[in-house]
Image (cartoon, helix red, strand yellow):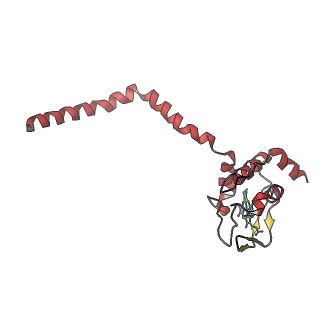
Amino acid sequence: MKYIASILLVVSLLSCRQKPAQKLADESAPAATVKMEKLHPATTVHPGKKVYDQYCKVCHQQEGQGISGVFPPLTPNRFVRDKAQFIDLVLNGMKGEIELDGESYNGVMLPHKQLSDQQIADVISYVRSSFGNELEGVTKDEVEAARQN
Ligand code: HEC
């Protein structure tokens, strides 16, 4: 019984050993295909998320929750809801005391005029459909019109 068991073990070890080499040679193409498929969902991420992560997240945080008393949250509130004001504050910045969810904030947000109309439309649309917000998006044309005012 012991003999048979160890023979089986040796046989299975040997067959295991050979497989990886064969696999590499035979299946390199399908493996690459699988990798491409895995990457694919990344392209469906909201275009505004990229802008958010680069230009807003550092203050308003990953989930838009902000930092209490320092950076206000982007969860449903009157600024996020008011499309025209939202566009204006991203373009021109914002300062002065405000109160949100019982916390007061008195900071300065710098203008983000350097972003393109498309980037601003994307990031506002992203915020307005994330963090518990379910509001319609903003178009590039709306940002362009606001920039000219
Ligand atoms: C350097 C930190 C900083 C960055 C970066 C920043 N903000 Fe702000 N943001 C603030 C502060 C501070 C206020 C509050 C200003 C005040 O007290 O009047 C604010 C206010 C706001 C408000 C209105 C209040 C609220 O919480 O709803 C919105 C909306 C907003 N920011 C969105 C954005 C978006 C979108 C971006 C990226 C394009 C961004 N912010 C980038 C610091 C920042």
Relative to 43, say whether 95 is above or below.
Answer: below
Measuring from the top left, give residue 39's x and y in whole percent.
55, 38
Residue depicted at 80% across the width and 58% down the height: 82
Residue at the far right in the pictured view: 149
In the rendered image, residue 52, in percent from the top left (x then y), is placed at: 68, 53
Q: Taking 54 as reference, is 40 above or below it?
A: above
| Towards the viewer: 59 or 66 | 66
| Placement of the C terminus among the 4 image quadrants | bottom right
Residue at the far front: name it.
134
Q: In which quarter of the view is residue 106 placed?
A: bottom right
- Where is residue 55? Give x, y as percent: 69, 56
Q: Single out the residue that lies furthest toward the top.
A: 26
Location of residue 122 with respect to 72 vertically, above or below: above
Please tell me in which quadrant of the rendered image residue 2 appears: top left
Which residue: 66% across, 45% down?
Answer: 46
Residue 51 x/y as whole percent: 69, 51
Ligand 1's image quarter is: bottom right
Q: Is residue 18 left or right of residue 127?
A: left
Q: Please give the count of numbered marks on the rendered protein.
A: 0
Q: Is residue 31 left or right of residue 104?
A: left
In this view of the protein, which residue sits in the foreground, 56 or 126? 126
Point 34% across, 27% down: residue? 22
Q: Quadrant of the N terminus?
A: top left
